[in-house]
Amino acid sequence: MAYIVGRCLLRELLRNKDMTQVDLAARLGVTFQQVNKYANNRQLMSIKVAKNIAAILNCHIDDLYEWIEAGEKQVD
């Protein structure tokens, strides 16, 4: 089964952890603007960033985005 990346769930995850985008940016060592790009679906996270965010939020990488089934075809 193949999947495509859907909406970023970072805002909801941060809200559930009682953490702000500014807090996350400081923990990651990036700007607030960069985290805001992820949270507002203006930029996809690299696997490295996603792994670090998942570690900070104590969740799985898969939890950072909605995943949409694309069927049996291989998806780029």
Image (tube, rainbow, N blue to C red):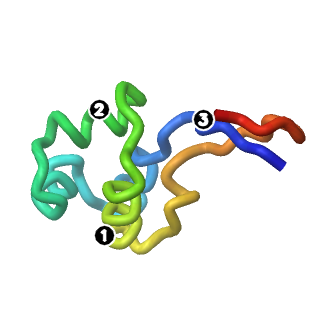
Q: Secondary structure at mark 2?
A: helix
**At x 66% / y 37%, what residue is drawn?**
4
Kindly indicate whether the residue at mark 1 contacts the one at mark 2 (C-beta within 8 angstroms): no
Q: Secondary structure at mark 1?
A: helix
Residue 18: x and y in percent read 30, 61
Q: Tell me: residue 67, above or below residue 18.
A: above
Residue 19: x and y in percent read 26, 58
Kindly indicate whether the residue at mark 3 contacts the one at mark 2 (C-beta within 8 angstroms): no
Tell which of 61 and 57 is nearer to you: 61
For the residues marked 2 and 3, what is the alpha-carbon distance in whole angstroms?
A: 15 Å
For the residues marked 3 and 1, what is the alpha-carbon distance in whole angstroms?
A: 21 Å
Rate crowding at label 2 as few (under 14), some (14 to 19) or many (20 or more) other CA atoms within 10 Å: few
Q: Amino acid at mark 3?
A: Gly
What residue would you read off at disc 2?
37
**At x 39% / y 64%, what residue is drawn?**
51
What residue would you read off at disc 1?
56
What residue would you read off at disc 3?
6
For the residues marked 2 and 1, what is the alpha-carbon distance in whole angstroms?
A: 18 Å
Q: Amino acid at mark 2?
A: Lys
* Residue 27 picture quarter: bottom left
